[in-house]
Amino acid sequence: MNKIQKLINELCPHGVETKKLGEICAVKKGKQLNRESLFKEGCIPVINGGINPSGYINEGFNFDKNHITISQGGASAGYIQWMDVPFFAGAHCFVLTNVSIYDRYLYYFLKSKQEYIMNLKYGSGIPALDKKTILNLEIPVPPLKIQEEIVKILDSFTELTAELTAELTAELNMRSDQYEYYRDKLLNFENNPKITIKKLIEVTTWNKKFENCNNSKTLNISSILRKKANEIAKEDGDIRILTTGIVELYTYEENNEKLIFQGEVIAIPSGGSAKIKYHNGKFIDAGNLLGTSLDSNIIKTKFLYYFLINNIDLIENSFKGSGIKHPNMSEILNIDIPIPSISIQNRIIDFLDNFEQTCSKLNIGLPKEIELRNQQYEYYREQIFSYLTTGEFERER
């Protein structure tokens, strides 16, 4: 930062010249491309009004690499990108051409103003950016030496941030693979004559009786509808709502006492995609089939959960239907369950619980580290351009 400050003071003692964007480049709009021409994968990305490509084509790009694009229409209008590959600009994409200053410098400046530019869009239906508005954006134009130094610093910072993100992502993936490896090892009891094998139906009880199953039903737990779950859900809360989807909801015990149950259960969605959940404590059910161990002195409910998670393909293969799939419980309840001694079950549960907690902390901590580095980069970038345009650094927010 000191070097940039020194260069500005030396080369721009009376301030930095400002020009309209239309004075330093042309702004061209892309061409309409039919959706039928797009592929999910391909050689050439099609850039439109979104943050990500609209799709791909395999030939016929209309702009070469090293161009700045600005999303013209849609919720992301005003989003700035640097295209480092040839691309096809769609009808909702502005492309900056014939840039008379250092193009990477212009990109970094516009990116620093992205939020401001996105707020310039108009329209209540599909929001859009007016070309005249873009052309009238004011751009500080310091001497080329300063532009090059700014780009050198920000390119370096961008590269370091990308490397860190890649390293932390690799660490997350490695820990996840490691966890699955150990879980598979611990729960593999094949060819072990000392292990008793029983059907799931023999060692569990459920909240429902199932067709073609002589299963035990001793859990008196009813479910609420998804609509009701959404109505009582809060941003936080002390009671978990066991949904059938990925997203978990929570609510407060107060005013919901009649809906709350307490116990240790495994949950299989009554419809949708196959998954297994576990809960021990107070909860409200929202559409699951709930089971628990018939005798915790023989098999632990959490051991059942870990075994079924490790064999989720058996559950997935039992979900049937052409539309919304539903579990065929007669198949699921006939899954073979190995039953090691309680001491072994407890050791497996403790090991996997601890490993899962470690992975969970990494899943929170590493993305947070990436976020902090990105914030640090954005702050540094904004300080540079603040000093460039005002001669002062922004106060810390």
Image (cartoon, rainbow, N blue to C red):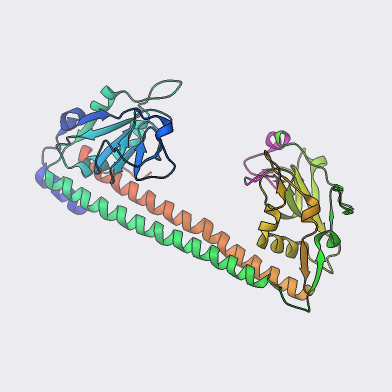
Query: Which of the two residues, 315 or 283, is positioned nearer the viewer here?
Result: 315
* Residue 276 visible, this orientation: no
Instruction: Name the residue at the top extreme.
Output: 124
Residue at image x 30%, y 49%? Answer: 380
Looking at the image, which is closer to me, 303 or 355?
Answer: 303
296 left or right, relative to 352: right
Q: Residue at x 71, y 60 (%)?
A: 308
| Residue 363 visible in the shown view | yes
User: Would residue 231 be found to the left or right of residue 39 on screen?
Assistant: right
Report how many numbered discs are placed on residues in the image: 0
Q: Is residue 130 above or below residue 211?
A: above
Which quarter of the figure is the C terminus placed in? top left
The answer to which of 294 and 200 lies nearer the viewer is: 200
Above or below, 168 against 65 in this view is below
Residue 142 is inside the magenta segment? no
Residue at 16% in and 29% down: 23
- In the image, residue 97 lies at what x, y percent? 20, 34
Q: Position of residue 336 (x, y in %)?
A: 77, 64
Residue 217 position, x and y percent, is 88, 51
**Left or right position of 373 against 245:** left
The stretch in magenta equals: 228-250
Q: Nearer the viewer, residue 142 or 328?
A: 328
Q: Where's residue 182, x and y in %?
A: 61, 70
